[in-house]
Image (cartoon, rainbow, N blue to C red):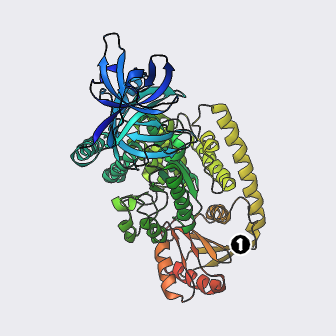
Amino acid sequence: MDTIVYRLGAHCDIEDVEEGKIYEAKVQGFAKFGTFVLFNDRVKGLVHKSNSKKSHEERDTILVRVLNIRSNGNIDLEEVTPPVYTTQMVVKKTPMVRLSDLATRVGRTVTIDGEVAQIKQTSGPTIFTIVDETGTENAAAFIEAGVRAYPDVQLGDLVEVVGEVMMRNNQVQIEVASMTVLVGEEADRVRQRLEEALEVRAEPEDIPFLVESEVLENLKPELRKIAKIIRKSVFTAQPIILRHHADADGICASVAVEQAVVALIRESGADFDSESYLFKRAPSKAPFYEIEDVTRDLDYALKDHVRFGQKLPLILMMDNGSTEEDEPSYRMAKVYGLPIVVVDHHHPDASVDQYLMAHVNPYHAGGDFGITAGMLGTELARLIHPPVEPLIRHLPAVAAVGDRSEAPERHRYLDLVSDDYDEAYLKNIALSLDYEQFWLRFNDGREIVKDILNLKNNPERHRNLVALLTMEANRAIEEQLSASMPHVQEQVLENGARLFVLDVEMYAHRFTFPPPGKTSGEVHDRLCTANAQDAVVTLGLGPDFAVIRSRGVLMNIPQMVRELRDEITGGGVNGGGHLVVGSIKFVEGMRDVVFKRLIEKIGAFPVESTR
């Protein structure tokens, strides 16, 4: 049998040393009567010159047997040189604690067990992010600068960590003395404990909605399911990428959830920088998950996975994600196993559900697009982290006016905040969001958006910014419409609706605000006012797209897209949106063919009486 040589852990002291056993030590210094050696920074002993076998220099490793431990703490040693031996670590027996208790153990050595959620190599120590059923904390392990500590420990392993609790930059951190990967029954026991506790901890509170709504009540089980999925991601340090349509409704929905998630990340014990890599909000130009979007998300996620040892993210779609246009991106995400959940109010296609963990959409519960994403997002945020409510309770009203909701819930959400925000001002906030997001392009503009939405406890700056952005947006709209309105062409369709067509490529300024969709919407509003008694359809026509706005024609844009795609060979038709608000894309050379068939289809839909 091999000789066993013991290596004393960093936090061990003399009580952990036993007579007769062999230990690994380092030479500290010399005296006439012998050699002083260190077992660790706390324990030292003496090898009398009569018990030395070799000549040594300072910091040499030496194997010593403990001959005697004296009452005054002195340890008598003899040098040994076993030809074959194995080394075992001696770890000080310390109390097992949960991560949420570490702040009360600063300066003490503790033992924790949990799952490795991230491994980040710095220029100094290796930082392991550990999660258990109570929270998230960092454990720093150091061998030498920039060298990976405990290379056998991998992402997702269950580990037992022994170390001293310290404060670093006002954050609790464990200075690792030892880290052991748990296996077998011990690992199963810890995993089961964590999973059972996580199920309970992640369950959202059963709180009432801000307003009465039969549709919302029908959606509540699925909203709670998504809230639980998000809370689990936060508690297990899984990054979240929130993709949303880049308009006022999508911004309100996503910012509400952003406030809840970031607050929960901080409350769960993650360090100050965690929110920057655990949560990312990303606007999407189109109301669906484009290949460009998923490519960006995968690129960032895979780089962070390799560079920082992060888990792959949860994808949360808001104000997009319900239609077959999303499916190519979903298929790409599926290759990498990315979980996806959707909160949307565009008309859904059943085929997308095969890619989703959960899917909230008012069409699933007897509602329609009048239940806006901002309404859904705010109620979801309250389920994720209820204390966020006072900060975000006005966001559904901003979304309602921004997305021109006519659902009964619109008035209820407006009434909820009427003491602080009247309808005209809410419209100014929504317009400011649309205007600023146009210039932000693909950036989230987090701090500017929070100022626009009055989320930063600086009401004077909020009012000044909204006033400025509203003025600039309205000025740009007036300039655009003064150039565009004289070029609107009119015809009456077979169903009696008035069709107005504006070539936004030829008769509207490009690459500036308002973009084609917003320009078409503003033109449509003016034409509806001028033709109050008639059904009105407005087409903003580009070289390879058409923006559709309708009042009084009971059309179905997703259905038209599918029919045009099947009927026009070589048209390259795709697109979608709401039933009466959306867009269609096609190849430029087939514009006239698509345009002709599109008008025929619009003219065949029934007209709702407006008289």
State the SS at label 1: loop
Q: Is residue 512 left or right of residue 354?
A: right
Task: Report the residue at 52% width, 63% height from top.
Answer: 294
Which residue of the protein is positioned furthest toward the bottom in this rendering? 569
User: What amino acid is at disc 1?
Assistant: Val
Task: Work out which residue is located at the far top of the displayed protein and give it.
Answer: 72
Quadrant containing the N terminus is top left
Tell me: 69 left or right of 384: left
Task: For residue 556, say whether it is visible.
Answer: no
Q: Is residue 90 above or below residue 72?
A: below
Look at 64% across and 78% down and name the residue there: 491
Residue 457 location (% of width, % of height): 59, 31
Which of 610 and 353 lies nearest the eye of the viewer?
A: 353
Q: Circle 1 sits on which residue? A: 488
Residue at 47% x, 79% y is 562
Q: Residue furthest left?
A: 185
Compared with residue 79, is residue 511 higher up or lower down, i.e. above or below? below
Residue closest to the eye, 125 or 241? 125
* Residue 95 position by quadrant: top left
